[in-house]
Amino acid sequence: MQGEALSAKDQSSKIKDQSPAPLRVAILSSEAVPFAKTGGLADVSGALTKALQVEGVDSFLILPLYDQVDRKLLSGIFIDDLEVEWRGKPSRVRVWKSDALKAPTYLIEAGHYFDRGRVYGERDDFERFAFLSRAAIALLKRLGDAPDILHCNDWPCGFASIEMRVRRRHEEFFAKTRILFSIHNLAYQGIFNPSDLWWLDLAAYTDAFIFKGAASALKAGITAADALSTVSPRYAQEIQTPEQGYGLDWLLRARRDRLVGITNGVDYELWNPQTEPDIAAHFSADDLSGKLGCKLDLLRRFDLPKEPERPIIAIISRLVAQKGYDLIRQGAQAILEAGAFFIALGAGAREYEDFLQRWHDAAPQRVGIYKGYAGEPLAHQIEAGADIFLMPSLYEPCGLNQMYSMRYGTVPVVRATGGLDDTVENFDPETGKGNGFKFGPYSTPAMLEKIREAIYFYSQPDIWAGIQRNGMAVDNSWSAAAKRYLQLYREMAETA
């Protein structure tokens, strides 16, 4: 007698049992929100890990435990005896766990390397992050199944990219792990002396590192990865050119079949003018009235006159030439003559800090500055209270502030480069379409022309509200970006 047919319930159970395990992705980064941040990489690392969890991915994050990490974010010690082979002998470190991201986060404690008061800027940065990479790979063997994907971010993780490439040839545990290397800013390459490769136990891979007589962790990461990504489609094209390739354009052209551009997203749980806890008033595209309260609060915070009819132009960035500060310095007087307040938040090169201070001293009733990184609340308050957000970047791999700005009804004025060009649509008064203003040439006159154009439309409230709503309607959430990464991960895993 034949066996009885399976019931519908049994069939469903059997199908469920045979369904593939969720994709397992380990994200390695030198910084991540809310633990440590110097720039957009931190926003991306934290938000992507969380967004992947929502998509059903078994994602987790690994990063250093810096001394500035708020210990209240930690759940406790996860491993107190992680053995790391380092400089010819075993070293033991502790690993802490955090659930602050709503996705597992593992922070490697190594005080000698990470208790420095800052994330980057030390002479031995290459050594610090080589150790991070070695420790992260050791940790992966203590976390259960090997990841399908090791997602390495920027030059500090270039060491992990090449080590994983080597390990999987000899260690069955990592045989199917594939490596994605993400380029967030090609200008930062992790350069160090090639003679140091021998004691890092990487001398056998000198060819992968060597770059113009030096060793480049970024070049090694690009060379060793199975696939490459960068943070916008436009930037993926730009870095293949001599003008923006920083000497590695030839390598990126050679690997262009493995290179994709995926525009970063915005964590809409953190950046939401309807629920934001740190701003003076809530508002939405349907009711923009609360933005006035945020503007008045911003003027108060920077000790500027209570003149809400005057537009506020704001910038939040590192004070470096890349961000267009040469153009701002050249156009400073003309910006004020156009009738605007100017507010700047950031730190960096002394020459630009000094310029902002002189500008403020010369026009204290029109220019507000905060030198340094005041933390997330002030950044949110500036985005909510400003009218225009200026990003005249020489180059910009992706940029996040233009997307934060649109979320808060703050209209971006940007140079058409990298992710700025991908995400900002120039306003067309004939059609009413567009969410900002873009200029092409890297020049002060081109920047000033667009600033004046923006201020002209600001003086027409109905048109301005339309531009604001156009920006607020754009979906720059991480959901779409996470789906693109998930597609890429799956394609990579299928080659294992």
Image (cartoon, rainbow, N blue to C red):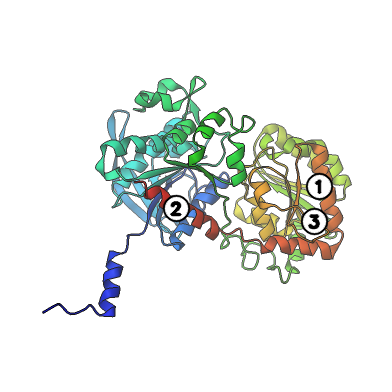
Say if 397 sits above or below 51 in the image. Answer: above
Which mark is nearer the camera, 2 or 1? Answer: 1
Q: How packed is label 1: few (under 14 Cα within 10 Å), some, or many (20 or more)?
A: some
Q: Nearer the viewer, residue 136 or 444?
A: 444
Q: Nearer the viewer, residue 86 or 262?
A: 262
What is the secondary structure assignment of the residue under circle 2?
helix
Depicted 354 relative to depicted 279: above or below: above
Residue sitting nearer the eye, 395 or 428: 428
Where residue 289 sits: x, y (%)?
76, 69
Q: Nearer the viewer, residue 90 or 46?
A: 46
Q: How far across and how far down the image is residue 473, in percent?
A: 67, 64
Residue at mark 2 to residue at mark 3: CA–CA distance? 49 Å
Identify the secondary structure beneath mark 3: loop
Q: Sequence-wise, which precedes: disc 2 or disc 3?
A: 2
* Residue for badge 1: 450
Tell me the quarter of the picture where residue 244 sits.
top right
Mark 1–mark 3 distance (CA, rounded to whole Å) = 13 Å
Assess whether mark 1 and mark 2 are in contact (beta carbons under 8 angstroms).
no
Type of the residue with mark 3: Asp
Mark 3, Cα crowd under 10 Å, few <14 / some 14-19 / many 20+, is few
Name the residue carrying label 3. Answer: 428
User: Could you give the CA–CA distance between mark 2 and mark 1, rounded to whole angstroms?
Assistant: 45 Å
Q: Residue at x 27, y 45 (%)?
A: 173
Mark 1 touches mark 3? (CB < 8 Å): no
**Can you name the residue that lies furthest to the left here?**
1
Say which residue appears at 82% left-offset and 55% top-offset.
311
Task: Using the image, determine if residue 72 lies above or below residue 185.
Answer: below
